[in-house]
Image: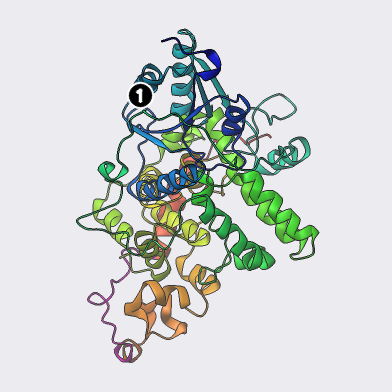
Amino acid sequence: MTIEAEDRPVILWFRQDLRLADNPALAHAVETGRPILPVYILDQGSAAPSIGAASLWWLDKSLRALDGSLRARGSRLILRRGDSEAELRHLIDETGADAVYMNRRFEPAAFARDADIAHGLQAEGVACKGWNGTLLTRPGSVLNGSGQPYKVFTPFHRTLLATVAAPPHASAPAGLATPPGAASDDIDAWGLHPTRPDWSGGFDWTPGEAGAEAALAAFLSRGLKSYSTGRDIPAEPATSRLSPYLHFGEISPWRAVEAARTAAAEGHVPAAEAEKFVAEIGWREFSAHLLHAFPQMTDKAFRPEYDAMPWRDDPVDLDAWQRGQTGYPVVDAGMRELWATGFMHNRVRMIVASFLIKHLLIDWREGEAWFRDTLVDADLASNVQNWQWVAGSGADASPYFRIFNPITQGRKFDADGRYVRRWVPELRGVPDRWLHAPWTAPPEILRDARVRLGADYPRPIVDHDLARRRALDALGAVVAHRIPDGD
């Protein structure tokens, strides 16, 4: 039986755009008036690096939420596992589909894979169309006066805001026609949720499009009002916590930007606070554009001279850092928060990264890999760019001589110790004065607090002053002949 052109379904290939509103590929698929086959393919072989364990936890919940939203509209999510191109071809053969619509991914390996798949399918008469559904604008569309990618954030962000406008809002469709018959995997069989043991008991998140909107509403009503200062206090709920929702595409970045600006325009928050948040969305954008333009950033220093760093291979120190057993309370609190919740406060991320790189002289790639596995918001571009920023090896990076003192950072941003006491409960009884450097406390203070250094809580694995001098010597030698950046 011949299938008429208007009856041939369109495959809607979901990836990092797990939402129905403001989804360009979905909106264009609906415009065709043809049946739509929503599909997600779990392909862990062709778009390296692989998805980390915490992100798989999130993906499990997000796919279930998306399937629920589709079923409420008369559709369903078809799940396939394996090579993306092979699974798309299987679905085309099974259903007679002659078009694949997608929102593009811009990470280097995924971008190249998408192009290969599109060329192969188009050569066989299958239309492949892609849109930008994950960023404010496509990488390569914001360039400096010489037509080159920006390497410094401020002029990039200024040009971005001056030249890029928000697309029209697209509501989720009321209904979707999906033909029956296409086989789907059982998501339970994928085993994305951890077992034996289930380490996700502290993951207090609601993945999915509805969860994203709830997180945005909570941020607009609380954290945004004093965002520029509150975002540095890890004990306060002042950050947006939108990063995993943005990474999985459960909310459009334009939705977040416009919501913040609307709150300011209506007088609910100061305009400066809204724009500070917009700048953070801009930094995410900057990271994505950089990685697209300079794909070597995933495993090479953006500044090549940094690849000559004399990194220490020290599995014992790396393990102490990963487990939150360094002897520096704010570092340990951050690493324990990460393990327990799949998240870490942004200020503390900088502190723990600086400690690994500059106190321990351990390669930033080790930290990036750990974050990729343990963060629910493990976005490749942001992760790589932020680690290289701390290392000094990235674009528009922190100066090499900027070495966070974990003691003073703790005292400044966790002055009352609420953050440390939550995540390092063995120090709960130590007074604020000594909390961030418990080894300096008099013996009677530690005794009263029931803390035995080296038993209940570790002594520092490295001396701050010695580590700082060692890092400055190593980094200073590496950057001696650095060429300054332009735009």
For disc 1, the marked residue is 87
Instruction: Judge whether residue 400 can be spotted in this image.
Output: no
Q: Is residue 265 above or below residue 124?
A: below
Quadrant of residue 463 in the image?
A: bottom left
| x and y, in percent, of residue 123 in the image | 47, 7
Q: Quadrant of the N terminus?
A: top left
Looking at the rendered structure, the secondary structure element under dot 1 is helix
Horizontal and vertical percent for residue 16? 49, 38
Q: Residue at x 26, y 45 (%)?
A: 191
In this view, the residue farthest toward the left is 196
What's the colour scheme? rainbow
Which residue does the image show at 46% across and 83% down from the upper left? 432
Picture residue at 38% right of the left edge, 25% below the top: 84
Identify residue type, mark 1.
Answer: Glu
- Residue lying furthest front: 1
Q: Which residues are magenta?
A: 447-463
Residue beneath the point at 43% across and 81% down: 434
Measuring from the top left, give residue 274's x and y in whole percent.
Answer: 71, 57
Q: Camera-side residue: 435 or 119?
A: 119
Front-lying residue, 109 or 485: 109
The answer to whether residue 148 is seen in the rendering is yes
Instruction: Name the chief secondary structure element in magenta.
Output: loop
Was residue 448 drawn as part of the magenta stretch in this picture? Answer: yes
